[in-house]
Amino acid sequence: MRIAIDARWIFSEMSGIGVYTHELVCGLAELDRQNDYLLLFCDEAVCDRSFRDPRLRDAPNFTPVLVRHGPFSITSQIMLPCWLARQRIDLFHSTNYMMPLAAFPRYRAGRRKCVVTIHDVIPLILRGHAPRSRKSRLYPVYTRLMLEVGRRADAILTVSRASAGDIVKHLRIPNASAGRVHAVYNGVSPLFFRTEDEPVVTPSEEPARPRRVLYVGRSDPYKNLPLLVRAVAEVRKQAGFPIELVIVGAPDPRYPEASRLAAELGMGEALQWRGHMDDVELRAVYRECDVLAHPSMYEGFGLQILEAMASGLPVVCTTGGSLREVAGDAAVLVEPNSLSELTNGIRMVLERPEYATELAKRGIARASTFSWSRTASETLAVYRDVTGPRAPVRLL
């Protein structure tokens, strides 16, 4: 079987979808030596970086393909169907919602199959999720596109049961076809896991150090970053020790509310914007902070939750979307938009070292149940399911 995977969602600065795409193809490369894979890139530097990973570099059945057009371009919609036909591709997998529509007509099933990963449908659930984003500005186009993807894809992968239910509902997929939507969890890189000889250091063991509340993510309004700024300001008033808010992620000039609010509340140097970080830098930050706070109204998965848990960092997060499903009993769960619950959750972790240590242990155990190898294995099973009976795949 010849499989094409759209790896153009891996950008120079890795995001959640980029991490998913890279880890999925690397997991498949370790798992499958029978099928032939063609990975589409539109950035040569990103392609080279991806194939420096030994998991891909040492897989002879994985071949990079450079194209000149990005996944959102009109040219891609025109040229990609022709390329798929010329290359005699059996299955095309887009690791984000965009697919080459002309290659997969709505009412005519063809030999070539299409799998699409839809990580969430937040714009359809929270209409004001990010009012200055392209999806919001082109909302009618985005809505029509998502409905078409829902009709045309042979299988839809998503990253949680909560997201799967939302996809069935908001893409108007009939109950009889709901089996086309598969919940396949993300994994977490072994890089983040705290080793046995790397003890968790509680604040009580370093009394002179400021307590650090960590946020990892974007500044889109649905992420609720201003609420976190207010919560940290409240904790700073009530606690008997200094507290800092560390934000990993570049400030977004479209949404300056969190920075403005921090200035109004007199947080000054207590607010640290660290910008974008690679995994090695992020691993170090998880270890220097005392709690990850994630106040998002909704998440399709919440990869930073697992990364923090694997690092032995206690987590306070909302129940929005899949977060309860992912966190289980290993996090302090609060209601979205509740300032009091978020404030109390952060205080509870910072002021009770024994509880923080117990939460860290539970988090490591919880994170260990998620792996990218499982993601790859379950994704490969979907590939086999949609393409029908074939010679059995030899798994390594």
Image: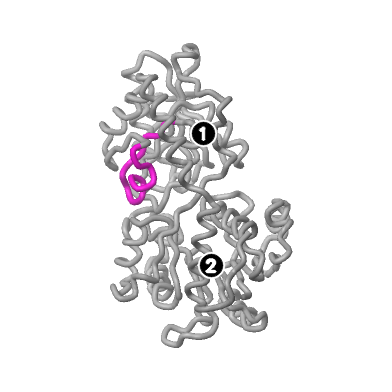
The image quarter in which residue 305 lies: top left
The image quarter in which residue 294 lies: top left
**Left or right of residue 109, residue 322 in this image:** left
Identify which residue is drawn at 33% across, 38% down. Answer: 329
Q: Is residue 284 above or below residue 119?
A: above
Q: Is residue 297 above or below residue 332?
A: below
User: Which residue was labeled with disc 1?
Assistant: 311
Mark 1: few/some/many CA within 10 Å (<14, 14-19, 20+)? many
Per the image, label 1 sits on a secondary structure element best described as loop
In this view, the residue in front, 354 or 321, is: 354
Identify which residue is drawn at 49% across, 61% down. Answer: 378
Q: Is residue 167 magenta?
A: no
Disc 1 marks a residue whose amino acid type is: Ser
Q: Is residue 325 magenta?
A: yes
Image location (x, y in percent) of residue 333:
31, 38
Work out how far the residue at label 1 is from the one at label 2, CA to CA, in angstroms: 30 Å
Per the image, label 2 sits on a secondary structure element best described as strand
Mark 2: few/some/many CA within 10 Å (<14, 14-19, 20+)? many
Magenta range is: 314-329
In this view, the residue in front, 210 or 266, is: 210
Q: Could you tell me which quadrant the N terminus lies in? A: bottom right
Image location (x, y in percent) of residue 254:
46, 48
Dot placed on the residue nearer the N-terminal end, 1 or 2: 2
Q: Is residue 333 above or below residue 6?
A: above
Q: Residue furthest bottom?
A: 108
- Asked if marks 1 and 2 touch (Cβ < 8 Å), the reply is no
Disc 2 marks a residue whose amino acid type is: Ser
Circle on res. 94: 2
The mark tally for this picture is: 2
In this view, the residue in front, 272 or 14, is: 14
